[in-house]
Image: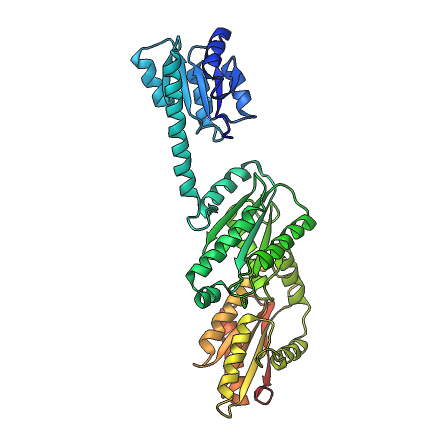
Amino acid sequence: METKKHILIVDDVTTNLKVAGDVLKDKYQLSMAKSGAQALEFLKKAKPDLILLDVRMPGMDGYETLEHIKSNVETSNIPVVFLTVDDKRESEIKGLKMGAMDFILKPFEPDIMLSRIEKILQIEDLRKNLSNSAKKDPLTNIWNRKYLEDDMERYFINKNRGVFIIFDVDNFKKANDTYGHVFGDNLLCKFARILENKVGPKDIAARLGGDEFAVFLKGDYTDEEINTYCEMILIEVHRDMKDEQEASYNPTVSIGISVAPEDGTDMLTLYNRADKALYFVKQNGKDFYHYYKQREEYLNSTIDNFNSEQDMNRLENIIKEKDLDNGALRVEYEGFKNIVHFVQRTISRSNQNVWIILLTLTHTGPEKLATEELEVAMNEVERAIVVSLRKGDVTTLYSSFQYVTLLMDASEEDAREIAKRIITTWQDVSNDRHMSLTYNLKNIEAELK
């Protein structure tokens, strides 16, 4: 059954309210107010589809009431029709310039009144549909990034609490390339339905672009509640995104979380911090969730409490660990796995010496290193590595404060020279006297044969 449109009638004369109500009551849900002030109070609690507003009222007249309605972002889009006994053109022009949709003269002609109201509501429905279309993602039909940004901006005006969650469909490009774009599009639509069904009426699920989605939960949530929510999403992804025709595809998503106001009070800040938490998940096995605050705690603890010899031993164990399914090496980091596969293919065809360099950033300052400072320092390390390596060498991020580099067909002397060159290059651009870059070196040619 179709829900009746809701009309608010504002008039200080009880007889006028009754006459208008008798004309409209069979087709519409009606509410009444006897003054502009009473109407504005009503609008704080409910948002009708149309307002019929008397022009001449004591105290706050219709023009002043309309000015208040249009100045409030929550009510500015509600169509307003003036009710008046004044048929002067100047009054009509004034009202239209202020934003009124139409004028209806008193005494009311029922057929004319019904016809005008019906046309205005039809126009408003069309406007809403067009507006929503511009705010919806055309593939998945959930909200797009622009709508999410605008809604969050309005929400944070009152310094409210909330949870911003980023979702990234793991290995989407590979699935798209392997099974086709139709498969990939269906995958994104399935995930959109999962998110859409798991948000409340005030919350938002949106597609940010590509295989990246977001949910904004409005309100104050405990970590336990957020964990439960994320785990519920992961379970549904494993269950509902599985494709019967492509049984080899195992769907997973990675999740990054930031919380307002602790991590920020605008979308850009919350997005950037949730994205850093998401990156942590991507680098540590995927198919899970992580908070920005957890990542920051991890960075501070790991750079102050590390053992590079143990890290080198752990790295050797990762390299030695075999994947029982296909004989390939199984490692913790996706990027490093690709490097190891490359090394395996190369040394299987020649007697090359392969050296591994573990570069570790250390900090000895009196205060803990800020997350942003560590990120800047690691970017400097990355640039130093890139300009120092030879063509054919490979590097990848190993942890939040370490890089690992493989040197193909190199002597120990060459390897040490390259490691020292990286450190010297980094020292030339680093301004933090409490920061230092060290290296560990290991020949892994024998283990990889």
**In the rendered image, the vertical position of residue 5 relative to residue 18, given as above or below:** below
- Coloured how? rainbow
Q: Give how far across and how far down residue 195 sits, in percent.
A: 55, 49
* Residue 431 makes an appearance in the image: no
Number of marks in the image? 0
**Residue at (39% x, 38% y) in the render:** 130
* Residue 445 makes an appearance in the image: yes
Nearer the observer, 373 or 176: 176
**In the rendered image, the vertical position of residue 180 relative to residue 115, given as above or below:** below
The answer to whether 147 appears left or right of 403 in the picture is: left
The answer to whether 110 appears left or right of 326 in the picture is: left
Nearer the observer, 441 or 189: 189
Q: Give how far across and how far down residue 43 sits, in percent.
A: 53, 24
**Residue at (41% x, 32% y) in the render:** 125
Q: Give how far across and how far down residue 308 sits, in percent.
A: 65, 76
**In the rendered image, the vertical position of residue 237 relative to residue 18, given as above or below:** below
Nearer the observer, 137 or 38: 137
Q: Give how far across and how far down residue 207 sits, in percent.
A: 48, 50
| Image quadrant occupied by the C terminus | bottom right
Which residue is at the far bottom? 351
